Amino acid sequence: MQIMLFAGFFILFMALQASAQDTTLQPQTISIFSSYQPVLKQADKLSLTTSLPEADTTHPRLIYNIPALNLHFTYQPIPLSPLAMMNDTAAPLYRYFVEASAGSYLTTILRAGIGSGRIDSTAAQTPFTYAVWMNHLSSKGSLAYQQFGYDKVEASGRYFSPNIAYDGNIQFQRDGLYYYGYNHDSLHYQKNDLRQVFTRFGVQLGMSNIRENAVGINFHPILNLTSFSDHYQHRESSFDIEAPIEKKIADGISISVSYVGKFATYSDQQASASVSNTISAIHPALHIVKEGFILHAGLNPSWTNNQFFLLPDIVNETQLIKEKLILSSGWISYFIQNSFQHLSTENPYFVGYPMQPYNTRVEEKYTGIKGSLAGHFTYNTKFSYVTYHDRPLYLNDSLDGKTFYVVRESKLEAYQLHLELNYMSEENVQAGFRLNWFNYFHQQTEQKPWGLVPFQADVYARITAWNKLHLYGDVFAWSGSFYRAKDLSAHKTSGVLDANLGASYEINTNFEAGLDVHNLFNSVYERWHQYPSLGMQILGSVRIKF
């Protein structure tokens, strides 16, 4: 065994000796049989041509996948569903009405009216609206010839063109009375000698733009033609014109110019005498209306009976607390035409129109506050210093006292206090208080301010219950006015405190009945000396509307 292992190791050793003896490397060569050259493939050239795409007339179908949104509230909302429009059940406006009243002192009141009413929206629209009224009032007191009569017929209309509205008004008025203010025990007159009848016929025409025109000017001219006469052949013809225009020049700023002309001619046909009375004025002004601020600043150059006056015209309103406290102040001056019609309206018992006419120039400087409170109250206060130049006063005839003469006060000054407070709750409750007080002083011509009432106050209330019952009442107070006794001394008439009450009930949609009580305290007061009032009056009325 050992001999065999020894022989194996000997053979392996001899083989390793043989391989270690050969150390020379043979040279090697590389044979290249061909060369490779890479070549890119020829690209195909595209032929591009332009052309418009064909119009696609099919509507695309858009499919939206909006996930449902679910909101969870602590309450359950009421589902909404469409409903048919309900019929208009509002009562239509009444186009006609007739009212008749009768009561104590043989008082008779008749009223009637017709109008165009509300236009049906389904019918052809008419550009014309109209209304006609008729009024009659007559009473007869306990004194001889204590009679009054009043009649008036009036018609008005408005025509709308695309840009301009045209207005028209025509009226006839007749006032009848008697000069009953004398001592009936010692004096006796024939009825026809005491009769007085005032007749008025008037026509008014006007026009105004209802849309802004190309030049941005607003205008509203008004023309009045009037004929006024009495029972004693005194007649007055008047021609009045007012032509205002306004131009907006900026936001909240505008300028205006207005012309006012009053031309009256009075004639006494018995004396074959006539006289003219004229007023002409031009009012240039600047208007500024901003939030919480209003200013009207202008001049009032005026001509009256060949005399020229340059008058101020300044008014300002400034909000100290929005809508609750507004400071109002101004300095204004203007003329009042003392026409025959104007004097007869102030005192129907005056006689002797002055054949040298004059007009009253009023100058007023005032300040005050106004505003609204709690959504239901409105108030207005004003304190003024007023100067009257050439103010007509009414001095009673000292012989029998039934007539008054016009006397000319060259200058009269006064302090004026005006208070007003109103309350309104929807349309069911309305109440208010009004007061006017004048303190006259510095008279230059006359001894007293004859015939002027320095104090007036009024408290009123209107209440509607169940939409059918209407209650109303007022309490009023006047102070007396100065008059001259037979010994030429100055005296004052007694004041008055009285009340009026009334109620009306709508029986149905067409009939209404009412009851009125005037002068509830039965006060017999004298607005003009020796002309007592009627006292307490009770009137019942019926009204039909359709």
Image (spheres, helix red, strand yellow):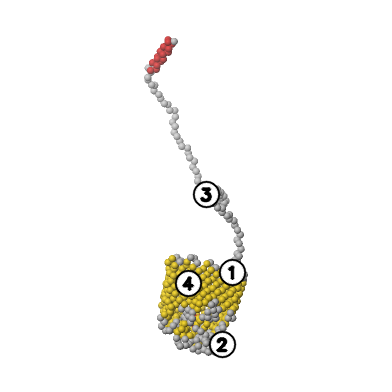
Residue 458 vertical placement versus 487 (above, below): above
Q: Residue at x 44, y 68 (%)?
A: 326
- First in residue order: circle 1 vs circle 2: 2
Q: Is residue 306 visible?
A: no
Per the model, the C-alpha gap separating discs 3 and 1 is 83 Å
- Residue 41 appears at what percent x and percent y? 47, 37
Q: Secondary structure at mark 1?
A: loop
- First in residue order: circle 3 vs circle 1: 3
Q: Secondary structure at mark 4?
A: strand
Q: Residue at x 56, y 89 (%)?
A: 190
Residue topped by disc 2: 191
Residue topped by disc 1: 468
Amino acid type at image mark 3? Ser
Per the model, the C-alpha gap separating discs 4 and 1 is 29 Å
| Foreground disc of the pair 3, 1 | 1
| Foreground disc of the pair 1, 2 | 1
| Quadrant in which the C terminus appears | bottom right
Per the model, the C-alpha gap separating discs 1 and 2 is 46 Å
Pointer 1 local density, CA inside 10 Å: few below 14, some 14–19, many at least 20: some
Residue topped by disc 4: 420
Residue topped by disc 3: 51
Q: Secondary structure at mark 2?
A: helix
Q: Are marks 1 and 2 in contact (CB under 8 Å)?
A: no
- Residue 502 appears at what percent x and percent y? 56, 74
Amino acid type at image mark 1? Lys
